[in-house]
Amino acid sequence: MNLWQNKPSIMKILCIGRNYAAHIQELKNEVPAEPVFFLKPDTALLRNNEAFYIPDFSKDVHHEVEIVLKISKRGKHIAEKFAPDYFNEIGIGIDFTARDLQSKLKEKGLPWEKAKAFDGSAPVSNFVSKSEFADLNNLNFSLKVNGTEVQKGNTSLMLHNFSKVISELSKYFTLNQGDLIFTGTPEGVAAVKAGDRLQAFIGDNMMLDFEVR
Ligand code: MG
């Protein structure tokens, strides 16, 4: 029996970076040959439209709106064709990123956790059944800041679709029921400031609505 089958299930947040070409361009990054993954701990989660507090170690915290998958059963080495069996619900979230810190860490080839995994860096919406959507590979989503649309994406523009992301992640990490996967952000990322109101949408449905403090 493999060891991973006996481990207790503690939720984790898995994220893919650089999954939308136009966002890669805006940050002047290279298109990666393989998906770029990073993790956030459960202490990064914000739920129920809790306010986000800008941490004092950054002067440039960016919003990144992303579709989020909720894993519905445990799996490892999941083949792409079976990946849809491993999530039943989707939501939307913000992958808050301390861009100033991240740029310094990237320059030095250091891990990104300080810039990506800090407390409150992962607000997520409620989750809805994926069966409510006609085509998960053609899903519009967007973010408004203070009533103005600033980010707009469609899942057809992902470099790695949901199945590919699940399959690739599960080569390295056992996926547990309740784990969340942030699937990448489209272009339009920018800094938030205290007093901003962020509203995230899947299609026309507002799923997330919270304040920055
Ligand atoms: Mg992101």
Image (cartoon, grey):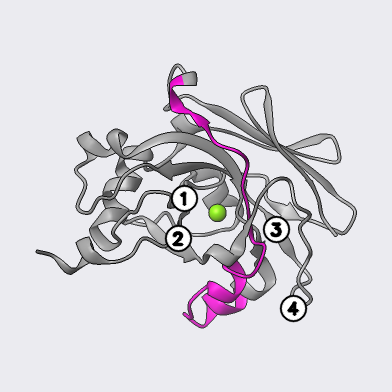
Q: Which mark is residue 2?
A: none
Whether residue 35 is visible here, answered yes or no, is yes
Residue 11 is situated, as x and y percent measured from the top left of the image, at: 44, 59
* Marks 2 and 4, the one that precedes in the sequence: 2
Q: Mark 4 or mark 1: which comes first in sequence? A: 4
Q: Residues within 10 Å of mark 1 (few under 14, many from 20)?
A: many
Tell me where the magenta segment starts and ends, as one range.
103-131
Residue ID for mark 4: 57
Q: Earlier in the sequence, mark 3 or mark 1?
A: 3
Q: From mark 2 to mark 1, how far is it between C-alphas?
A: 7 Å
Residue position for label 2: 12
- Tell me how far mark 3 sits from mark 1, CA to CA: 20 Å
Left or right: 202 in relation to 148:
left
Q: What residue is pinned by disc 1?
A: 180
Q: Do tag 3 and tag 4 residues touch (Cβ < 8 Å)?
A: no
State the residue position of label 3.
Answer: 62
- Closer to us: mark 2 or mark 4? 2
